[in-house]
Amino acid sequence: MSAKGDLAFIPLGGTGEIGMNMNVYRCDGALLAIDCGIGFGDAANPEVEVMMPDPAWLVARKAQLRALVITHAHEDHIGAIAWTWPLLGCPVYLSPFALAVAKRKLAERGITGARLLPLAPGTRIELAPFTIEAIHVAHSIPEAYALAIRTPHGVVLHTGDFKLDPDPLIGPPTDEAALAALGEEGVLAMVCDSTNALVEGHSGSEADVRRSLAALVRGLSGRVAVTCFATNVARVESVALAAKAAGRRVVMAGRSLRNIVAASAETGYLRKLPPFIEEQEAGYLPDDALLLLCAGSQGEPRSALARLAADSHPHLAVGEDDTVIFSSRVIPGNERAIMKVQDDFARRGVRVMTAEDHAVHVSGHPARDELRRIYRLVKPRFSVPTHGEYRHMAEHAALAEEAGAETIILEDGDVLRLAPGGLKVVDSAEVGRLAVDGERLLALSGAALAARRRMLVNGAVMASLVLDGSGRLLAPPAVSAPGLFDDEREVAALAARLGAAVGDLPGAIRRDDDALREAARGALRRAVNQELHKRPAVEVHLLRVSV
Amino acid sequence: MSAKGDLAFIPLGGTGEIGMNMNVYRCDGALLAIDCGIGFGDAANPEVEVMMPDPAWLVARKAQLRALVITHAHEDHIGAIAWTWPLLGCPVYLSPFALAVAKRKLAERGITGARLLPLAPGTRIELAPFTIEAIHVAHSIPEAYALAIRTPHGVVLHTGDFKLDPDPLIGPPTDEAALAALGEEGVLAMVCDSTNALVEGHSGSEADVRRSLAALVRGLSGRVAVTCFATNVARVESVALAAKAAGRRVVMAGRSLRNIVAASAETGYLRKLPPFIEEQEAGYLPDDALLLLCAGSQGEPRSALARLAADSHPHLAVGEDDTVIFSSRVIPGNERAIMKVQDDFARRGVRVMTAEDHAVHVSGHPARDELRRIYRLVKPRFSVPTHGEYRHMAEHAALAEEAGAETIILEDGDVLRLAPGGLKVVDSAEVGRLAVDGERLLALSGAALAARRRMLVNGAVMASLVLDGSGRLLAPPAVSAPGLFDDEREVAALAARLGAAVGDLPGAIRRDDDALREAARGALRRAVNQELHKRPAVEVHLLRVSV
């Protein structure tokens, strides 16, 4: 690929699927990385809890890497920092709020030495041949940035996640003046959020949610629990203000909430609120004087909200005539889990309110009217939809073309040349996914996770044979079959069948390790397949003893 | 429990969660079973593909069981017949259509000797002390029945799944005259479908869907693919008629569709349609002369529709400017899978139409206006909401109380006395879930499935030690660790660590099998836990050889 003399955009994750953003710009051979997000496993990948894009392509070229820039502190943009940074070792530019979040993530893994450099809107950072400038945008988290990336080949606007909220409550609205000025300067390409490209109209304002939450909570008696995304600090503040106006003290439940609130306090947010009280103190307050702010809006089974729903929380409880408000959206894939939590509440007489029946949530991403406006302001020559399923990016591309931009829809790993010449995919970068597995990363396509997926359906069989040189069994075979039988006697029967099968083999095979191992494996496979119609992974340990 | 002298309703499955219906009525000690459905695994039970309620309680009392009655041929009511009947061995009453479906299911498992007895509306079957009478109801499948169950203690109406469709297209509308007559006769209790108790208004008519499908297909050029629930024979007919009106021949793709269409033909449905053509012939027809009717509306990865979307179908293909219509609903839990299929279509330029943007689906369950009407007709003294999540049953109960019925919300296993005296849970029946695992049933709570769930997260370790009586290792330990390492060298290192650990043990332990096994297990556990922060199931095979 012509690494010299061009400007290219290379999505390593996030394009074609929500979450796990990892983007790279290449200019005259130099590289700039934007974001390093995580995603979560689902029914299709039950063996994975947390996954991230494989940065191998970038790691192999880290000598060319000038920096990693984080647009904002959502998990799908910053979540992999403690895994990715040690592999890249480059300086990291990010907002003070994101910096506070990143510091926590690095500390949790005991990672030291990361150069985290605060990035402020309006100041230009020289990372030759790149010059980056952060432009403040409104989003469902404090200090979200779009990035103006100036290069010898032209200017790119990387929007990150944003919306055009006239009253975002925390921080100013999206800096439309800066975007317009950039548009006047001339923008070669805009790489833009597609999440809500299927949604007509406007995403609405956090201020509307604040008003309706206040009215809602004021009208409620009994205990009130509210769940929202911890990172939506404006929402957390709205809940706290609604509680205050209704004469309720706020109890905060959930690690993710406490982490973000701590990071918010460090960086100057949520300071004018009455102090939250401890879970243990909740019991001493009358129900009407209490509001429980809980993590777990996605139905996470171990979350504070799920425990509250199942009445298994050590300190907090709700019941008959209490109310729980889901001030959040349903992330696709979490429907059943959320439904279960809501059902657990309903079963115990707790009123459940959601965005479906009350105005308690707005999205942090631009709906179609907002996208149209951003195109009017920025007037990019090229538009590269990112951050969405294919349909979102396709709808976004159609809208961008109406707005006069030339567009292309990418898959992860496409190396898209932006200049010189028109949009062209000129190469492909290796992409993949890594699962965070305990304290290490495993390739989703690797042997270990493949074995787990197989064992989930087929179980496993292990047999041990101890023989002398002539192939005579010196002890009865030992067999284990985890995941296959509820009754140990069936395992014993399998061992007996194996012993008989080995006994029947001709001496030549019993003397040959590979042949014998294969024969034993085959015998076990046939036995299990006949009996259970299963194809387990079969391991045979052959131990030769000379007597 | 007083089994004598009472009438009781006992849900063994289906109450509190959609699917897996298995209900029992007990009258003066005699039992009557209604339906035996299956459900499907999800993120919470990744190790399960198909599950069913554990009929153990019923099996233990099968001497008292008069019959099993199937209300209709949906999987969540009939799906477990080939597993449940052999355990019960009782006569089975069901509609001719359901009988044709059941015959296939029994034949697929090679089950013979089942007494399948056709049940026709209006005729009374004496199963003393029960007298059952089928009442035809409209539903999204042919020949669905509500059951009037007459007993010495009073009349129960078990509605099964139904709707009040003025024009269900196949079969007559719900027999409201029969329901009204029953209401005049006096109904002690109605056990009623709650699925759509949260939906205001009316569920709509299949006839509306037929009209809009016809208009939609007539207006389309290029290839058209439609997916719907195979069991919705009226819908299949509507699709075929829409194709005919648009001059398109229908290709049917998918085993479930072919099975149901065959059962339909046997029982007199879909006869007036032009014959479907074979997948292999599709290629010879111009695109505008073709309609592909595909199974897989829930995004099942191996379905005809998923293959069509991924362009991996052996005979059929769609592409740029073709259209796929989802004439179906999204069953909760399938969102991500369906989204993926729709995205695969979009990626290749195929237009995707769903019930969200076109009038191509109506539910087969009663919305609130229909529920209100059924209560006006039947005027039950007691109402027992069933078939729904808790919130559905709670909303249904509130509606039933407005309609003047006394209600109670049950959990699976509750033994609800209907007479004598008022509604009262007097006992609880053992309930559980069985997973269909290859050719047998496994308890979801059993050791085998527990081991698989554990191995999915933690992998497994097996080690073999061969020693002489004094505990001297006669060969290096053999270790396997499926699901833990991508690199075999790490497994070898684990084996070496085990060998060293065993070598360091005092002779007394090495001579004692149990102590040695425990020590070896501990050493492996510690090694894996230190290195990977994992807690795998560890099996150690100890083989003693006297030399």
Image (spheres, coloured by chain):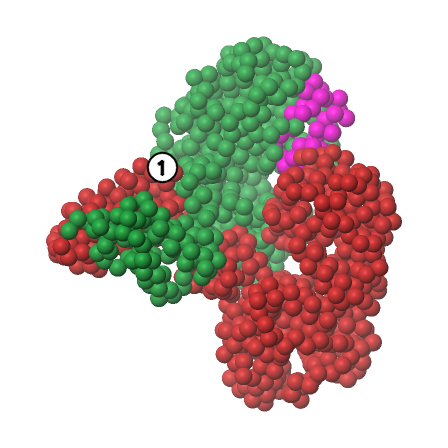
Chain colours: A red, B green
Q: Secondary structure at mark 1?
A: loop
* Residue B249 image point, x, y percent: 52, 50
Q: Is residue B533 left or right of residue A22?
A: left
Q: Which residue is mark 1?
A: A487
A489 lies above or below B69:
below
Nearest the eye: A469 or A435: A469
Q: How many marks?
A: 1
B148 or A162, nearer to the observer: A162
Q: Is residue A475 above or below residue A100?
A: above
| Left or right: B259 in relation to A397 | left
Residue A288 in sight in this render? yes
Question: Who's the residue at 78% across and 52% down the image?
Answer: A276
**Range of residues picked out in magenta:** B379-408
Q: Is residue B400 magenta?
A: yes
The amino acid type, in three-letter code, at marker 1 is Asp
Name which quarter of the figure residue A127 lies in: bottom right
Q: Few, some or many C-alpha atoms within 10 Å of disc 1 (few <14, some 14-19, many ≥20)?
A: few
Which image quadrant: the C terminus of chain A?
A: bottom left
Tell me which chain the residue with mark 1 is part of: A
Determine whether, in the image, residue A300 is placed left or right of residue A368. left
In the image, residue A40 sits, relative to residue A15, either above or below, namely: above
Q: Position of residue B391 (x, y in %)?
A: 68, 36
Residue at the image point whose x is 75% and y is 76% from the top = A120
Residue at 81% in and 61% down: A271
